[in-house]
Amino acid sequence: MCKEIFLDAPNIGELEKKYVNQALETGYVSTAGPFVGQFEDKFSQYLGMVRAVSTQSGTAAIHMALHELCIGSGDEVIVPALTFVATVNPVEYVGAKPVFVDVDSDSWNMDPDQIEKNITEKTKAVIPVHLYGNPCDMGRIMEIADKYGIYVIEDATESLGGKYKGKLTGTIGHFGCFSFNGNKTITTGGGGMVVSCDREKMEHIKFLVNQARDGNEGYFHSEIGFNYRMTNLEAALGLAQMERAEELISRKRQLNEVYREELNGVEEIMFQSECEGAESSWWLTCVCLKEGADLPVLRDGLAGKGIHTRKLFTPLTEFPPYEKYARGRHGNSHRLYERGLCLPSSTLNTAGDVKHVCDEIKKILSGKREKINTKR
């Protein structure tokens, strides 16, 4: 039987069990309890931000950022065509129009030139996504945002620990949004976080995620709020994970290094690259196959060895709710989707596991290469 090699399984240890058991023993399993505040404080301290507010998901975090900036009907928000659908759904939630731009072929992140070309008088915000943990060119993006007076909401849901010119992702724009889904670098099972250095806006978001409930007046609600609170159980898990964050981020980077070393020189493979000044957290290590390499054959061959992989995200304009917004074909986004592959990147995997994956990749690709050469 082949050893299972994990794509993105969580790394849960004794500390996590200890904190979750403490939450269970106190009876604070819902949205009340000390771990929520402790987790938020720990997270904001790690990022160096004045405030962090926990939410039920990264999607909710993006939604709250858009809502707090009063973005709504008649407004446009620029998003990359290649990302998970959770980036764009909140734009629809607030009634704004998403404007899709293509990504750079090397970093796989939204192309700043395409951002500027798509800005109109209706543009209110841009949501750069640090895809698979790889930071965007935030210097260019912030310059463009300042030039046109638009907001920047960083989708850092995949990039905890990533840096751009020494600054952690999620701390450079007006808001930063994070996800703690079970497949992320740290997890709360579900959950997310929104951060900013605007204390007033953050306190208002904290108020809104609790159904806009006025604590001094019992069940009095002065605004329309949201049921986006994180539970104490989730926060207990998150606090333990945050105490191990550097260990887990370092492990992600180490696995990426092994992939690059072992697959160096394999002619069919291209890795995602970092822009100048970026230091990726490599949430997932992904590759793009060059023309002639057969992606389905590679995936099937790896699956037969118990090696889990996943295709890159489907371009958002391929989905029925968003195809009406397509302005021509986003060539790089589609090419990456058609030829891209996410490799096993769970911190449960060892360097030996990754070397084994690389050996299998080389065997499959060399076998395909030999067949092509034989036909010639």
Image: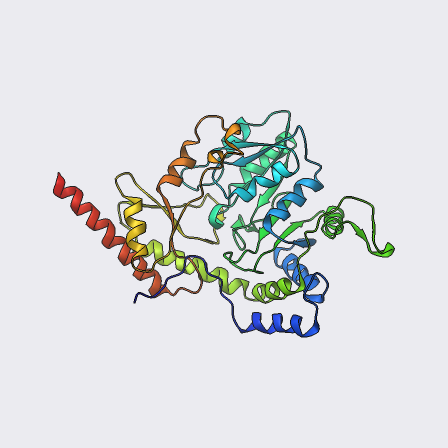
Q: Is residue 109 visible?
A: yes
Which quadrant of the figure has residue 259? bottom left
Specify the quadrant that holds the C terminus. Answer: top left
Q: Nearer the viewer, residue 157 or 196?
A: 157
Q: Nearer the viewer, residue 115 or 284?
A: 284
Can you say whether 240 is above or below 108 in the image? below
Looking at the image, residue 80 sits to the left or right of residue 307; the answer is: right
Identified at 76% across, 44% down, the residue is: 224
Q: Nearer the viewer, residue 166 or 309?
A: 309
Can you say whether 50 is above or below 353 in the image? above
Can you say whether 208 is above or below 334 in the image? below
Q: Position of residue 309 (x, y in %)?
A: 38, 53
The number of numbered discs placed on residues in the rendered structure image is 0
Specify the quadrant that holds the N terminus. Answer: bottom left
Q: Position of residue 171 (x, y in %)?
A: 61, 49
Q: Residue furthest front?
A: 320
Q: Nearer the viewer, residue 54 or 134?
A: 54
Q: Position of residue 269 (x, y in %)?
A: 31, 46
Identified at 69% across, 49% down, the residue is: 197
